[in-house]
Image: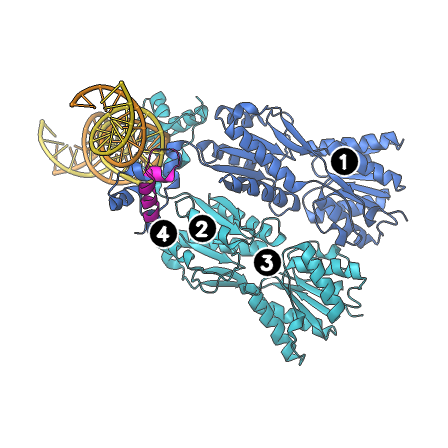
Chain colours: A blue, B cyan, C yellow, D orange
Amino acid sequence: MENINIKQLAKALNLSTSTVSRAFRDNSDISKETKERILAKAKEFNYQPNHYASNLREQRSKTIAVIVPELANNFFSQAIHGIEKIARDKGYHILIYATDDVFEKEVSFIRHLHNGRADGIIMSVSGEANDHTYLNELTQKRLPLVFFDRVYEDIITPRVITNDYDSSFSATQHLIKQGCKHIAYLVINKNLSIGKFRMQGYIDALQKYNIPYDDRYVVDCTNSYTKNNAILKRMLTELKPDGVFTSVERLAFATYYACYDLNISVPEQLKVIGFSSLEIAPLLNPSLTTITQPATKIGTEAANLLFRMLENPESVDPNEKIVLNSKLIKRRSTEKG
Amino acid sequence: MENINIKQLAKALNLSTSTVSRAFRDNSDISKETKERILAKAKEFNYQPNHYASNLREQRSKTIAVIVPELANNFFSQAIHGIEKIARDKGYHILIYATDDVFEKEVSFIRHLHNGRADGIIMSVSGEANDHTYLNELTQKRLPLVFFDRVYEDIITPRVITNDYDSSFSATQHLIKQGCKHIAYLVINKNLSIGKFRMQGYIDALQKYNIPYDDRYVVDCTNSYTKNNAILKRMLTELKPDGVFTSVERLAFATYYACYDLNISVPEQLKVIGFSSLEIAPLLNPSLTTITQPATKIGTEAANLLFRMLENPESVDPNEKIVLNSKLIKRRSTEKG
DNA sequence: TACCATTAATTTAACGGTAAATATAAATGA
DNA sequence: TCATTTATATTTACCGTTAAATTAATGGTA
């Protein structure tokens, strides 16, 4: 009773195993009555075809792997939500892996996926400036890969990203129009694709408005709250910027905390804008002007792309790039005086 | 080349498949040199034992399933983060399922896990007042189940929860001590275990301070932002409470939005406290007094509990209940005048 | 020398399910 | 009537890996 298999079920029904098997897969020759009889008995015995046996035989797992840098993060959890929705509709299961931004973990996860556990991979990369060619092994194994948001430029595979350059340009421009003259750009990993594009938008916007670029205003931050707090306090006291543009959400929060500590009033003394997927940005003190990526949509698009690759590999150009637009939402943190 | 299996590798090495197999599993009789020779060749060919074949043979999947009501949610994403950490250390993989609070999806996910795909399940329930006995089938299949946070009282299985009654009592008491006389309690699903316990704490605290209990102050909310906004605005205008205690994070945010709309000033006219896992509660306007559950810790404890059940089923009492303490963190939203 | 123990390999038989090839019976048609 | 088609079921072989049973080779001991 405890672990019924197809043989026992077949015996109980006085049928062969392959007839029973057919009842669970639509295509084949089987009479309606037999099928119903089998399914009824299966329900009674609480039988389900063993997943590992089926997949071994069919050589596919109906499972996709999702690799992200962090889980407890607004952007990624929304993106995963989007992926989940699509996968569920297709009857696929989702494996989740978090790299904690450690390149070695990313490599290890990918390597462990060579064994058939997943039919495809959706990944937002850890972003170290390392050798990424290990990803090319996937192509040989016919394991499709889709990047989203954080990508490697030197790997050719379909991707879903946002218009980061434009958004950054607009964000910087917005600060300038609000009267800022000394704008700091906060970044965690300049090597990362998004770090680069976002920074270029910042630089070009400065140039357009004839504000000299000063690399002291490009501030390298980390993932540690304590370190960031120290870095930002020093920066804010020494450089006294009147505007801050943060390339990731976390750094906007860090800026707020630093301003609280230093008694700098936002937006009067310092205007703040940042990339952020925080849904309650309007509830912050002051409400935060954000560039908000369509996180859930990025997830659904990435999943759809992967499924296209799975269903019809030829139909997807390896250079395919889906670019979605982020939204600049103006709030108190960048209001004038 | 593209999909090498153990046979081809064995042939290339002039060895039998079982010798090759042994190189990948520690226990058996194999000479050091042979093992090294095999592993070297495997690396060269980028070979990994097929996961589905291994699991079919070994009858276990080294995979656990995690079922939660929502993914894009601070509490659950932190809890999943905790689960992921432990699972990773143990070399286990994680399947993720989101029920969107729909009971049928929960049942369907669980039913589909009867086929060996996962070795165990960690779940926070959808919480409908339905028939939960379908969960008892898991015991028959020897599929261990651990509940966390949102549980079914009528199912006997190990669980990790927080001291909700005490926290609610303290939260209500805190509002009373801050001068509130008319305290509303906001809840989404009163049938849910946490809904019940949290409400009892509220009721008992009122009683202790001789504040009459009035069920109009217990406000039934939903998961829809628009509906909640309407419900809360009506409630705030009609009942004019001076304190609000929200049993879930979302409702604290909804209260803030409603207050913004109605120009009610927090904390002067209305004090707000809520269960919340928001890390940036200090950045809200005003900063929000929270009861914060140790979300990540809940995840790690639940995972550890499940692994104990997997490794030594006898060692875990089905009635085992791990109770962690939440923290009441006082902030501006409940400050006096 | 004969015998046994040890080590290191191979052979074999599953694990549970599925598709192709094959069989059987009933229905159709010339 | 008999051959042919159709519908439905069964046999069989395999998916890739692994553990138990078996064999072969080596070394030590009486």
Chain at numbered mark 1: A
CB under 8 Å between callouts 4 and 3?
Answer: no
Q: Amino acid at mark 1?
A: Ser
Query: Considering only order in the chain, which callout, 4 or 2, is on the residue closer to the N terminus?
Result: 2
- The answer to whether marks 3 and 2 sit on the same chain is yes
Q: For mark 4, what is the residue?
A: B141
CB under 8 Å between callouts 1 and 4?
Answer: no
Is B239 placed above or below B88 here? below
Q: Amino acid at mark 3?
A: Pro
Q: Which residues are magenta?
A: A21-41
Q: Percent x, y for residue D12? A: 24, 28
* SS assignment at label 1: helix
Classified by dominant secondary structure, the portion drawn in magenta counts as: helix
CB under 8 Å between callouts 1 and 3?
Answer: no
For the residues marked 3 and 2, what is the alpha-carbon distance in whole angstroms? 26 Å
Which mark's residue is nearer the viewer, 3 or 2? 2
For the residues marked 2 and 4, what is the alpha-carbon distance in whole angstroms? 12 Å
- The answer to whether marks 2 and 1 sit on the same chain is no
Q: In the image shown, does B121 or A152 lie closer to the viewer?
A: B121
Query: Considering only order in the chain, which callout, 2 or 3, is on the residue closer to the N terminus?
Result: 2
Q: Amino acid at mark 4?
A: Lys
How many dots with numbers? 4
Q: Is residue B195 left or right of residue B228?
A: left
Which mark's residue is nearer the viewer, 4 or 3? 4
Q: For mark 2, what is the residue?
A: B110
Which mark's residue is nearer the viewer, 1 or 3? 1
Q: Residue at x 46, y 37 (%)?
A: A62
Q: For mark 1, what is the residue?
A: A167
For the residues marked 1 and 4, what is the alpha-carbon distance in whole angstroms? 53 Å
